Amino acid sequence: MTIDQLKTLQDKTILVTGGAGFIGSNLCETLLDNHINTICLDNFSTGKRENIAPFLKNKLFKLIEGDIRHLEDCHQACVGVDYILHEAALGSVPRSINDPITTNDVNVSGFLNMLVAARDAKVKRFVYAASSSTYGDHEALPKVEDIIGKPLSPYAITKYVNELYADIFYKTYQLDTIGLRYFNVFGKRQDPDGAYAAVIPKFVKQLMAHESPIINGDGSYSRDFTYIDNVVQMNMLALTTNNKKALNTVYNVAYGDRTTLLELTNLLKTHLSSFDASISSVEIKHRDNRIGDIPHSLASIDKAKQLLNYKPKFNINDGIKEAVHWYWKHL
């Protein structure tokens, strides 16, 4: 990703749905840093006002408080918009198991509302957050985009339905779309609190408080943990690509390496110990595996490299170092 590529967007307007969330606020920040008109649509159900507080005085930033479950809000947000980065969703496999109806309302009905509003506003491109959960029970590694299994959770179903709807909207209405299957994204502004907090910020906060992190299972489950800057790079590449062969498809967004939960926890302890040496002696605890969790996840990123020139800069160690530094300053 080059500065020149982003300069092509400086006379455009980008809508970021879920722009006050973890990934969305990082996307807004990058767009604003590159002097691009940015609209944030958020209902603050999971997004946080403090994530976008620094942007509110920027004349290029506009906040619309609204809900993607309301078609009228979606239409309002799309007025004058050239491109959409659709991040608004209810994440978390456990949340979807506990409340499948709300997850479906937001992730499927809300997604369809945004597609309709984008179509009606003649938006040029709709880039959306897909999910590695779409691979479901397909066991082969690495995960390749055109081979998936059956979903293992309501959340996974909703994210797969997004891909089906995006494909139909291209074929039926010629709305260009790109889906980005995120693999275990982490980094600054990811919320460490709440019942559905992601593992990295949750463990960081616990370790900083000298509390024992609890690993589901024996710690051998592995994930392709992906630092936020790699995810931002992929979104910007998806926005700016002129390669027609790169459109109307889906991509894995990952680093292309996997780390076990035990390795991850030890890595967190190592980097946090540079701030507080006593963290190195905090005990790690274990409990039963969680329903709906797949044992291993590893992405092939060859397609993204070939069609979008994706070059992830942060491996797990470099990403954890950056994330830990941010949390130490902000928690």
Image (tube, rainbow, N blue to C red):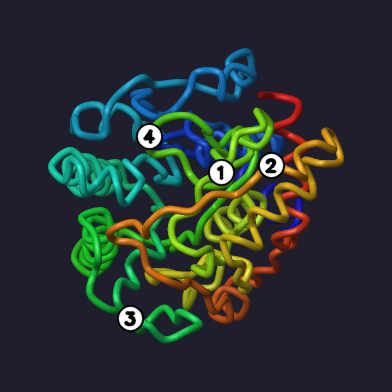
Query: Which numbered disc, 4 or 3, marks the residue that appears first in the sequence?
Result: 3
Residue designated by label 1: 213
Query: Which numbered disc, 1 or 4, marks the residue that appears first in the sequence?
Result: 4
Which one is in front in this view, the residue at disc 4 or the one at disc 3? 4
- As displayed, is residue 246 above or below residue 225? below
Give the distance between the C-alpha atoms of the residues marked 1 and 2, in whole angstroms: 9 Å
CB atoms at circles 2 and 3 under 8 Å apart?
Answer: no
Quarter of the image where the N terminus is located: bottom right
Which one is in front in this view, the residue at disc 1 or the one at disc 4? 1
Give neighbour class at mark 1: few <14, some 14-19, many 20+ (Cα, 10 Å): some
Label ID, residue 195: 4
Residue designated by label 2: 282
| Secondary structure at numbered mark 2 | loop
Give the distance between the C-alpha atoms of the residues marked 1 and 4, in whole angstroms: 14 Å
Give the distance between the C-alpha atoms of the residues marked 4 and 3, in whole angstroms: 28 Å
Does 136 sit left or right of 265 as displayed?
left
Question: On the image, which quarter does residue 202 sit in?
Answer: top right
Give the distance between the C-alpha atoms of the residues marked 4 and 2, in whole angstroms: 22 Å
Give neighbour class at mark 3: few <14, some 14-19, many 20+ (Cα, 10 Å): some
Residue 179 percent across, percent down from the top left: 40, 62
Which one is in front in this view, the residue at disc 4 or the one at disc 2? 2
Give the residue drawn at x 35%, y 47%: 92
| Secondary structure at numbered mark 1 | loop
Query: Which numbered disc, 4 or 2, marks the residue that appears first in the sequence?
Result: 4
Give the residue drawn at x 39%, y 53%: 126
Give the residue drawn at x 76%, y 26%: 329
